[in-house]
Amino acid sequence: MPPAAETVLDEVDGEEGAGGPAHPAGSVRLRLRSPAVAGPLSAALLTAVLLCLATLLSRSYPFGPVTRNIVDLGQQYLPFHAYWRAFLLGETHGDAFLNWNSGFGSSFLGDIGTYLSSPFDLLVVLFPADRVELALYVVTAVKITAAGAAMALLLLRTRPGPWPVAAVLGSAYALCGWTFDFGATVPMWLDGLVAFPLLCLVGEWARTARRPVLGPLVVALAWTANFYTAYMATIGAAVVLLVRLLTAEESASARQRLAGALRAARGVLIGIGLAAPLVVVVFLGTKAADPTPETTFAPAAWADVLARFLPATASLSSPALFIGTPALALALTLPFNRAVAPRVRAGWSAAVVLVTLSLQWEPTHLLWHAGASPNGGPYRQTFVLCGLLIAAAWFSTARGVPRPTALLAGGALLGILAWAARGSIDIDRWTYPAFGVAAALAVAATLVALLDNHRNTARVRPDSDTARVPTVSRTARVLPVLAVVLLVAAQAGEAVVTGKRIEEQRREEVAWSPRVGPWHTAVADEVARADAWPRHRTDPGEVPGGNDALIVGGQGADYYSSLTAEVTSRTLASLGFGYYAKGRHPVTLDNPVTDALFSIGTRIRSQPAEPVRQDALPRASVSAATTPVPPLVTVRPAKRPATHPGDSAFAVQERLLGAEVYELPAVTRDGRTVTARCPAGSQVWFWAPEYRGGATLAGEPGVEFEGKPPAVRAPMRALGTAPASGDVRIGLSPEGTARLPRQPVGCLVRAELDSAVRRLIATGATEVRATGHTVTAELPPGSTGTAVLAAPRISGWRCAAGGAELRPARAYEGLVAVPLDGRANTVTCSFRPPGLKLGGAVGLAALLALVATGVLSRRGGGIPRRRADR
């Protein structure tokens, strides 16, 4: 590089020796105390401003009235963060092991490790309970901002260069298409976006034999925050380390490179080991979770893949590769930039091409996703490729603007890419206008930078013996600043447009939940007044969104998690409960029999006061009804009473209750009419889990069913009261083929149910105490048979009668059960997440290995060696 070019670079970088020789006193420099601080801080500031601006322009909360709660953001992450806040402030019935508010008792440590273990999530405690949406937006924004800062820091550490350019590229990484398309609505994955540059930095430390203790701690933090995307980030960091080992400019022997790789492997293994207490619990929880249907990977069309490099494109079936036209153009110049060493060009170019191809090949697709093709969004690892493209752009421009030949070649590639993508279905009406404006601004920035280079080269005498620069004119000072401003304008404008359009497209195309508002507040107030746990449960009923009990309180069936146990899903479905998300989102069932089975003494019912809209806070009328129910722990006789045979939900309810409470009539179906005979005055229930459409009992309002196998199972619903004649006539209005079970109609005789409830109250626990993850019940003296805890028998429950040792609990029709011999007057059940002991042992071993590593490093002269490196 010519001395003049080095001088210009140093003016921007502000660190002696980073971009060229130090300037003598009196020379003009754009000086900051430390580029390693200025770059990340500037990237963070730019990222935060652009993210908020994109939200503002899309009219989304908190800068507009429209909800951001699309799909899982409203169904999972918002409720979990609301519960997390309450848990951290000591306002929940459960503890870190068990969550009593969801699924009638669910393992919580696995959910913490899946959704809530990021340090950023602790920020929710700084916000009031009625501002949980704002808290989640701040958490999301802080994560994205941190990713931009981390990438800028990595760039400056791998190769010195102008910190403003590093800041712009760091922001481009943080606001890539993957962030807008996936990360912004799945906040837990954003920890992987932060982790990737940090893990690459750990690889740099291992390569240069530095920070042997801090490196594993960073790995542990990344895997604890979100092990799913940390796994992908670790693979990406391994690719970066391999490229660095093969292309780094420092002279190193093959043995030294191997040693660097081994140090990195040691650090990663120790770090993952430190995270094992949480990771093992999540892993085993995933194994016990309700399985989703197997998915066969189908690669996206290459036109769609190319289109995703462009702005304002959104799709779940193709990789979100947008990093901004300026950043992409710089990355495409790298193969042609002769100012960069050939091995560096070859290494980074090969990495980008091979990782791109790996997205489209099933074996490597499975490798990226830990052996299982995910349901929905098969390109979750795309943020790694975005990071590699940013690194390629940095290596091409860190030492100065690429030469015209490289710029023309990279621009030609960019033009071919845009032309080849023109037929993709992912192209938006904003795509090419935004691309064109950004390209024009980028060209202007490049021309200004080249002019500045030319002026500085002309000012330096070719035969000069020193690198001394004469006094710089005002025009010369303005040109570098103007180039950076144009670059920021191009990158920023395109990012904002992309964020705005993806937000708007998502709201139009996918399911959404309304904002938390008066409806939730009214239900929460009613739940708080009625709460009598553990004497009985309070079910908050149907509230818009999923996981409602986590927002409004209570102890209902609603529960949506990737770790929803198969036992929970299967048990509730067999009893007539409905679900979404292929079984991982069971929902409440307003049925007096199941209320008795699960000790739901108070049920909250609410109805919307007006149509629920995206841009309005939902309001509703709310009421509460309390009825006598058996206690949380009941006693069943050794010999089970006779009940209706069969596998219908009505028969399963009776088997668990221990009494016949339904009349199950013979059903005749004639076209769209179902007829049967029920006892006069009985309550007519319709059970059709796969049915989608309306069902109307003659003389009663119609009821809608939403069955859509395998994703959605409709709960049983009450249609009304049987007439005095007993003739039941149900009209169907199906959407498509009406799929009904063999026994879709059950006639509930309330007197029989009341009698069964009185028997269970008389023989059940006289007192129940619940503390965190343990339940203790006092039983009537001489109780025999089986004590049943009204909670699904998920893995981890251990029980004992009297003072016996806790052992794995038995199951009674899917619920927790303890055998009784007549001598014990108490039963105790305690829950411990599976994998906790194993994970703790691995974590302890990793901690010892980390301590040994630190001691050996100090004895081996690690500190003096680091000082010498500096």
Image (cartoon, rainbow, N blue to C red):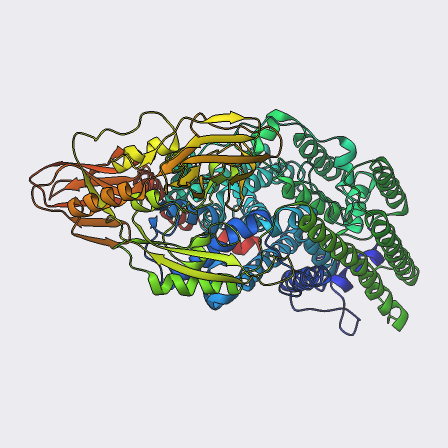
Q: Is residue 15 visible?
A: no
Residue 762 position, x and y percent, is 16, 47
Residue 763 position, x and y percent, is 15, 44
Name the quadrant containing residue 47: bottom right
The residue nearer to you, when weighing 188 against 535, is 535
Residue 624 position, x and y percent, is 39, 59
Residue 276 position, x and y percent, is 39, 42
Q: Is residue 400 left or right of residue 766?
A: right
In the displayed structure, would residue 141 be above or below residue 173?
A: below
In the displayed structure, would residue 486 be above or below residue 207?
A: below
The residue nearer to you, when weighing 866 against 467, is 866
Q: Is residue 639 visible?
A: yes
The residue nearer to you, when weighing 13 against 704, is 704
The residue nearer to you, when weighing 818 against 260, is 818
Name the quadrant containing residue 835: top left
Farthest-out residue, bottom: 26
Q: In the picture, which quadrant includes the C terminus?
A: bottom right
Q: Is residue 674 left or right of residue 454?
A: left
Q: Is residue 364 left or right of residue 443?
A: left
Farthest-out residue, front: 725
The number of callouts visible is 0
